[in-house]
């Protein structure tokens, strides 16, 4: 049995081990990254194909007759034509719920940086401003407490609920919108309201919705114009949920006070992305999921996926 990993680097840049594969498959090839023109060549003969962001269309899958199983190295699986894979009897598994804590942590890293401006004040001190000050303290920009502020959460899955728990610990009021009508037990301190109420009432909005036809471009100029002028927007979900040109315009016009995003509509970022020149928007390179701890959990779940398939009992199947 042959296994091929098409884009392994993000999951394991060298601090984890793939050696466990030796006990499960006869042969495996691991590529840090695979350009589109090399996907077919490298996938040829594979029984198991593994992808993170490499796109696997129906046109590609139909040319891989030996292929029996696909596993992602991520929770999202939109890069795979799962419907076609199902038609061909190819099971597809993902990696669920491995990065919840890391994503929730980055949400508050953004929030605390935007409200305390740690980097700005550190830079000022290192430039000698404090040494020259006649006062024992100073601040370059207003500092804001988040206690008693309202955090609005759009999408209330595992990550959204983890963010709510942290917000409760900070003494924030939490409101949330989710189209899912299931009962949320254990969250008596969260008020579930309409999307419009989240938009208009929140001091900070944190996005945790999946990327669907309904959520693509959800945060547009109209959405942003309803927010408080003092409000902050955080996105650690999917880049296309935000219309980036509209966000840049809203920030430049002062419709909202600031934003923090870990994801963009196209990744890696394009040089003409409007947010790259926006001083009021903090951007990190899709790292919320990438702590060593989270990647170790991902590796363990991936191992379970492969073991399950080899035993004839695939797990975490999404198709």
Image (cartoon, helix red, strand yellow):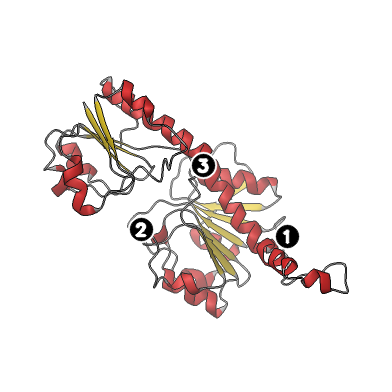
| Image quadrant containing the N terminus | top left
Q: Is residue 222 visible?
A: no
Please count the marks in the image.
3
The residue to which callout 2 is attached is 214
The residue to which callout 3 is attached is 100
How far from the left and from the top, in percent, is residue 133? 84, 73
- CA distance for labels 1 and 3: 25 Å
The residue to which callout 1 is attached is 145
- CA distance for labels 3 and 2: 23 Å
**Which tag is nearer the camera, tag 1 or tag 2?**
1
Left or right of 222 in this view: 104: right
Mark before the other along the chain sequence, 1 or 3: 3
Q: Is residue 91 visible?
A: yes
Position of residue 140 relative to residue 209, above or below, is below
Position of residue 256 relative to residue 56, above or below, is below
Quarter residue 152 falls in: bottom right
């Amino acid at each position: 049995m042959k296994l091929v990993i098409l884009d392994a680097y993000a999951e394991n840049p060298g601090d984890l081990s793939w050696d466990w594969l030796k006990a499960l498959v006869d042969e495996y090839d691991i590529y840090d990254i695979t350009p589109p023109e090399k996907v077919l060549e490298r996938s040829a003969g594979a029984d198991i194909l593994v992808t993170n962001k490499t796109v696997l269309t129906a046109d590609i899958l139909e040319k891989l007759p030996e292929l029996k199983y696909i596993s992602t190295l991520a929770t999202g699986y939109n890069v795979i034509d799962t419907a076609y894979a199902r038609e061909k009897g190819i099971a597809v598994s993902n990696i669920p719920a491995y990065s919840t804590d890391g994503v929730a942590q980055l949400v508050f890293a953004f929030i605390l940086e935007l409200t305390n401006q740690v980097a700005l004040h550190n830079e000022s001190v290192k430039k000698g401003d404090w040494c020259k000050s006649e006062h024992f303290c100073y601040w370059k920009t207003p500092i804001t407490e988040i206690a008693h502020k309202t955090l609005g959460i759009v999408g209330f899955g595992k990550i959204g609920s983890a963010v709510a728990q942290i917000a409760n610990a900070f003494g924030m009021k939490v409101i949330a919108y989710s189209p899912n009508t299931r009962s949320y037990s254990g969250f008596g301190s969260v008020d579930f309201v309409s999307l419009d109420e989240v938009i208009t009432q929140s001091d900070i909005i944190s996005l945790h919705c999946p990327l669907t036809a309904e959520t693509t471009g959800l945060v547009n100029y109209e959405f942003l114009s309803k927010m408080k002028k003092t409000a902050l927007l955080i996105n650690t979900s999917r880049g296309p949920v935000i219309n980036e040109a509209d966000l840049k315009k809203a920030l430049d016009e002062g419709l909202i006070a600031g934003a923090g995003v870990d994801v963009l509509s196209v990744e890696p970022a394009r040089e003409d992305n409007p947010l790259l020149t926006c001083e009021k928007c903090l951007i990190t390179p899709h790292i919320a999921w990438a702590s060593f701890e989270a990647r170790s959990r991902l590796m363990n779940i991936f191992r379970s996926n492969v073991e399950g398939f080899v035993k004839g009992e695939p797990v975490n199947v999404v198709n």
